[in-house]
Image (cartoon, helix red, strand yellow):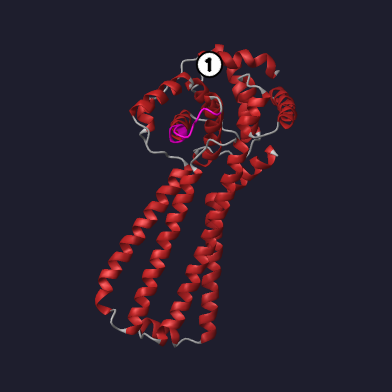
């Protein structure tokens, strides 16, 4: 078990990248309670794997891997287990998102919520300006396939927002 | 909506004040995820069987001089130990699954394989337990006379056979249905995701 020094170092790194974890929680969990649970799960999994992180990849890349894997495999635990991605089947509780200035952000996130878990990960990495090379390292999907998927996702989002 | 035009909106989302819990506290808390629940269930099952084994061992320690009691006693001990071992192996396997730092596709593929193997062995295990019970009920009265077993053996073999078949079928379908409801939808969804990545 890593000592106290590791804990401090880990906490510092997580604080530096906390917004990234919040974004993963925002697009993979649908209620505030689920987001808090997911945040906790991601941090616990990061901590459990931290001693194995040897700096072979960037810390951010490693963090994305753990966060996305935790979010996808943790779906079963969610109170709102999504079985269909039809707009009507998606939960509609965004009462915690307030303010007109957030309307566009809300529209974007609502559209992303309608994608499946892998598409969500691809969009998130794209929006975070990750290179296709890094996306390949995180997701394990070839760059060629990622480009094709990204193009399809853009079309899908365009259609989804047109229907709204 | 053009995704590229919204990159700024996405980035501005970063400036929004987020409530972050105390990291030091979080890392010392127990996970509530599906793997942690599975590990907890295996640990609980190991402890329950160990306690049950000890209670029955102590309660029957005086009767083991008789040969049938002796056979039954050690069969029971061996059965309990193999169950504890099976739960321990499942526990270890689940612990290994907790490592989430591989590429998402690799991690998901391995995760699905592990879950399916676990489910398969649970099916095999539950059927084996039912068969063992049937064999014991049929064989024991040859060595050991108990009122209930003797009464059961006075029933026609055909009715006994039909009852065993019905029992086996019920356990088979109920366990399948429970597992499908509990894990099936989850595993199917993960498999679907793996397929979309290929």
Q: Is residue A28 left or right of residue B151?
A: right
Q: Secondary structure at mark 1?
A: helix
Say if B152 sits above or below A25 in the image. Answer: below
Task: Indicate the chain on which mark 1 is placed.
Answer: B
| Residue A36, position as x, y percentages in the image | 44, 29
Say if A115 sits above or below B54 in the image. Answer: above
Rendered residue at 52%/86% (across/down): B157
Q: Is residue B152 left or right of residue B9?
A: left
| Residue A51, position as x, y percentages in the image | 44, 33
Instruction: State yes or no: residue A111 in magenta.
Output: no
Of the pair B60 and B145, the residue shown nearer to us: B60
Q: Which residues are magenta?
A: A46-56
Query: Which corner quadrant of the image does residue B51 belong to?
Result: bottom left
Rendered residue at 46%/29% (across/down): A39
Of the pair B151 and B136, the residue shown nearer to us: B136
**Quarter of the picture holding the C terminus of chain B:** top right
Query: Which corner quadrant of the image does residue A11 belong to?
Result: top left
Residue at the spot of label 1: B14
| Residue B159, position as x, y percentages in the image | 52, 82
Q: Is residue A111 visible?
A: no
Q: Residues within 10 Å of mark 1 (few under 14, many from 20)?
A: some
User: Residue reaching furthest left?
Assistant: B62
| Residue A9, position as x, y percentages in the image | 40, 23
Of the pair A4 and B194, the residue shown nearer to us: A4
**Quarter of the picture holding the N terminus of chain B:** top right
Rendered residue at 73%/27% (across/down): A147
């Amino acid at each position: 078990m890593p000592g106290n020094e590791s804990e401090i170092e880990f906490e510092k790194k997580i604080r530096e990248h906390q917004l990234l974890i919040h974004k993963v929680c925002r697009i993979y969990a649908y209620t505030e309670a689920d987001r808090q649970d997911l945040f906790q799960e991601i941090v616990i999994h990061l901590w459990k794997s931290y001693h194995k992180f040897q700096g072979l990849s960037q810390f951010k890349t490693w963090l994305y891997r753990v966060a996305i894997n935790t979010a996808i495999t943790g779906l079963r635990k969610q109170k709102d287990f999504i079985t269909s991605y039809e707009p009507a089947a998606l939960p509609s509780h965004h009462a915690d998102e307030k303010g007109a200035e957030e309307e566009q952000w809300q529209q974007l996130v609502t559209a992303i919520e309608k994608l499946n878990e892998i598409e969500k990960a691809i969009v998130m990495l794209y929006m975070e300006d990750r290179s296709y090379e890094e996306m390949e390292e995180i997701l394990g999907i070839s760059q060629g396939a990622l480009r094709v998927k990204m193009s399809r996702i853009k079309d899908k989002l365009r259609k989804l927002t047109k229907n709204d | 909506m053009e995704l590229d035009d919204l990159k700024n909106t996405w980035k501005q989302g970063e400036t929004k004040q987020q409530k972050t819990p105390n990291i030091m506290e979080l890392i010392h808390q127990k996970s509530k995820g599906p793997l942690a629940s599975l590990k907890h269930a295996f640990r609980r099952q190991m402890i329950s069987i160990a306690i049950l084994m000890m209670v029955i061992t102590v309660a029957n320690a005086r009767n083991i001089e008789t040969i049938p009691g002796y056979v039954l006693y050690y069969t029971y001990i061996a059965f309990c130990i193999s169950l504890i071992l099976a739960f321990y192996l499942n526990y270890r396997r689940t612990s290994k699954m907790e490592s989430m730092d591989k590429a998402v596709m690799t991690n998901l593929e391995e995760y699905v394989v592990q879950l399916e193997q676990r489910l398969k062995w649970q099916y095999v295990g539950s059927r084996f337990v039912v068969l063992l019970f049937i064999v014991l009920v049929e064989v024991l009265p040859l060595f050991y006379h108990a009122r209930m077993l003797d009464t059961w053996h006075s029933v026609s073999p055909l009715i006994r056979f039909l009852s065993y078949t019905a029992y086996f079928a019920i356990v088979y379908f109920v366990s399948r249905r429970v597992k499908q409801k509990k894990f099936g939808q989850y595993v199917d969804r993960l498999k679907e995701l793996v397929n979309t990545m290929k």
